Image (cartoon, helix red, strand yellow):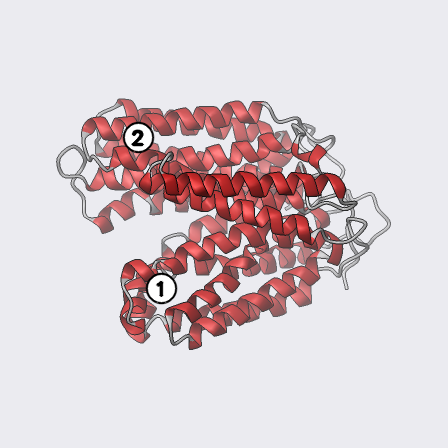
Amino acid sequence: MSSNTDVLTGASPLTRGRMVALVAVLILGVLSYQLNSSMLNPALPDMAERLGVSVDAVSQVISLFFLAGAVGGVVLARWSDFIGRRRMFIMVLSVLAVGTLVCIFATSLPMLLVGRVLQGATAAAFPLAYIILNENLSRQAFGTAMGVVTAVNGGVGGVDAYVGGLLSDTWGYRSIFVAILAFGVIGMVAIATVVPRDGAPKSAGTMDWWGAAAFSAGLIGLTYYVSEGGAQGWLAPSSLVYLALTVAAFLVFWVIEKRVSSPLVAVEHLKSRRVWPVMATTVLVLSGVFAVINFTLVILTQNSEVGLGMSASRSALLVLLPPALIGVAAAPVAGWLAGRYGWLRILRIGLVICIVGIAAVTILPPSMPVVLFAVVLFGVAYYGMALTTVNGLGVLQSPKDEPGILPGLNGAMFGIGASLGISFVAPYVGRETSEGFVTALAISLGITILALVASLLVKPAEGSVGTRRTQEAPPVHPVP
């Protein structure tokens, strides 16, 4: 990373060693949350057996975790504008520790679900880490650091699930929570030790809890609508009930935000092309590319009639692990390039490459070379370029008077986008016919093209996403 000597403030800049330490502890902090998202997947059968419930019932430990994360990421990131990033990060990891302890000692599924909701609410770790990097590093160093955090997060995919399976097979599912607890406590101590102390609040006034409640209700309703719509049909009565609740909650939210002095999200920001196209791009990227990598290609390569007839483990090794590992190398480079040549430019190039990859598997007959070609492109363009830049834009495009809001909102768009994408293509993939797979891939291709269009609508925030080679960094807080 470049040095921080270009910071034009009276505060003491971070030395190179301090920058490296800051990035390292923030990675530790976000991994404390991230390990909860996929490390438990192989342990679901063991949970069901030990708690005396069905696997279908215990699957709620995953769905409720992500739902709580969508809400917590938005609300807690915004709250940090009032109470400080470092303080909020420590609070987040403290809640994570409490939730993990509840999971360790849970004797029933409801008790376990309470712990999982507490764990999921700590999804704010990601936006907090991104904001802290932006507020303490030079613009060029921020780009590289964003890439490193994205790379480590993506590279964990698959490896943590494998380790979780080993722990579950050897000592039972509770051993996974013990490992996560140890990781979280170490992360909390590291954050408290290394992250610079908070300065003055970034936003005036007080937290808008009424707006937060209405927005959370709308987000919960939208999540259940996507889930129910994908399973029962978008116009099914049960789906329409969730849609009505979603619309009502967001209308109440809109009314509240227009009346309070320090809103959760100012209405003018939601209408700004600096904000909503970023959120739209994130939703569409996840809806398009995520569904191809994590769902359609996995099923296609395992299909013995029109696909490649692979086993589940071999399919995962071909489709899931390589792009994540490629992303480990590509993401830091993408972040460096974005800081040097422009975040939007690198995002759009990445989306074009993703479109080429999806088009290849859509048009060409299924074969090992075609799948490998697409997988390499997805590793570079999706895990490396797209994920790094949409996360970076979430920070850089956020309003100056509400710097915590867009990173939180953008984080929620990840889960919504992934759910939407799979819901759209699942009926066609489920047919397991050549026509069904082609239709599913064509839908994902169209969605990814829309993501590129949405990125063209983004109005760059002044001085944040331009293409100048050197840009002024934001203020740096003194090191404690």
The answer to whether residue 45 is visible is: yes
Q: Label 2 belongs to which residue?
A: 440
Badge 2 vs badge 1, beta-carbon distance below 8 Å: no
* Front-lying residue, 378 or 439: 439
In the picture, measured across the screen, residue 406 lies left or right of residue 290, that is right
Residue 80's disc number: none
* Front-lying residue, 463 or 174: 174
Q: Position of residue 304 (x, y in %)?
A: 14, 39
Give the residue drawn at x 40%, y 24%.
Answer: 446
Give the residue drawn at x 45%, y 60%.
Answer: 35
Disc 1 marks a residue whose amino acid type is Gly
* Front-lying residue, 202 or 23: 202
Q: Position of residue 293 (x, y in %)?
A: 35, 39
Disc 2 marks a residue whose amino acid type is Ala
**Image quarter of residue 235:** top left
Q: Label 1 belongs to which residue?
A: 164
In the picture, measured across the screen, residue 363 lies left or right of residue 216, that is left
Cα distance between the residues tagged 2 and 1: 31 Å
Against 88, residue 308 (above or below) is: above
Q: Secondary structure at mark 2?
A: helix
Against 109, residue 340 (above or below) is: above
Q: Quadrant of the C terminus?
A: bottom right
The mark nearer the N terminus, 2 or 1, is 1
